[in-house]
Amino acid sequence: MPTEPHTPTLAEIVRIGSEVADPSGSDDRVTELITRFEDRDEPVTTVGDVELQLAEAHGLTSRPAELARFPETYLKYLPEEIEKPGPRKGVMPGVRELLDSLASRSDVHLALLTGNYRGGARAKLEYFDLWRYFKGGAFGDAALDRNALVQEALDAVVAFGGPQVPAAHAVIIGDTPLDVACAAHAGARSIAVATGSYEPAALRAAGADAVFEDLSETAEVVSEIDRLGSWG
């Protein structure tokens, strides 16, 4: 039986964001924010979900102008953050080669699925020249529940001229148990890659159909995608 993936809570998201905003822990406003949300154990899976939870906590759900500031502020500062160096910043092994291989095929239709804002995903991928591989996709500002994004991505394929693909023939590639759970919820297959924060054992335990250390073995990964997404 797959193990239940750990879904980040609002408290964990606030703490992670606070560590980025105030790594020295010297800003009293950030400390107050952490204290305010330290007991908020509501699970969140998309940026839209985080936005809603924070808005409700601040009593902003009935004030659309204030709500609009969430993505505006994030997208305003994202270009600055992208330029900053980081130990895990970069294109993971094999990603570009795999995308090149899949993009050249007429029987494969690439779509992006992410819990991030569409604008945030585009900024990050354009920085590494990866956005051009995707004609569309599903984003965190389109659904509060990450599990709803698989169908959004399949609908996006149809919208940009691709076929109507049943979820059972879609293959989700991700690096967390949440990605695996998202695929399973929709009836899709999943390939998990251990280039993130999870070891292969944890990804297998989550129920991934296939697990790779990274995507550097292009032919092997493509073969697994063909096997899992086969219509035969």
Image (cartoon, rainbow, N blue to C red):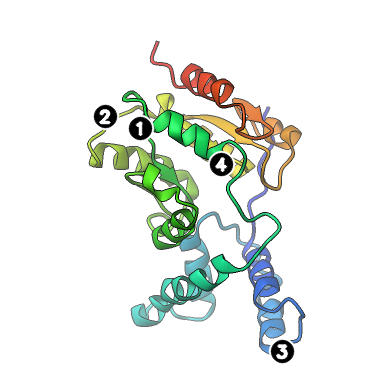
Amino acid type, label 3? Asp
Location of residue 216 by image quarter: top right
Q: Which mark is residue 163?
A: 2
* Mark 2 or mark 1: whose residue is earlier in sequence: 1
* Mark 3 or mark 1: whose residue is earlier in sequence: 3
Q: Residues within 10 Å of mark 3 (few under 14, many from 20)?
A: few
Residue on which the image places disc 1: 109
Circle 2/circle 4 CB separation < 8 Å: no
Q: Which mark is residue 69?
A: none
* Mark 3 or mark 4: whose residue is earlier in sequence: 3
Location of residue 193 by image quarter: top right
Q: Which mark is residue 179?
A: 4
Residue 127 at what x, y percent from top left?
48, 58
Q: CA distance from mark 2 to mark 4?
A: 23 Å
Above or below residue 58? Residue 192 is: above
Q: CA distance from mark 3 to mark 4?
A: 35 Å
Residue at figure coordinates x 41%, y 24% from the top left? 169
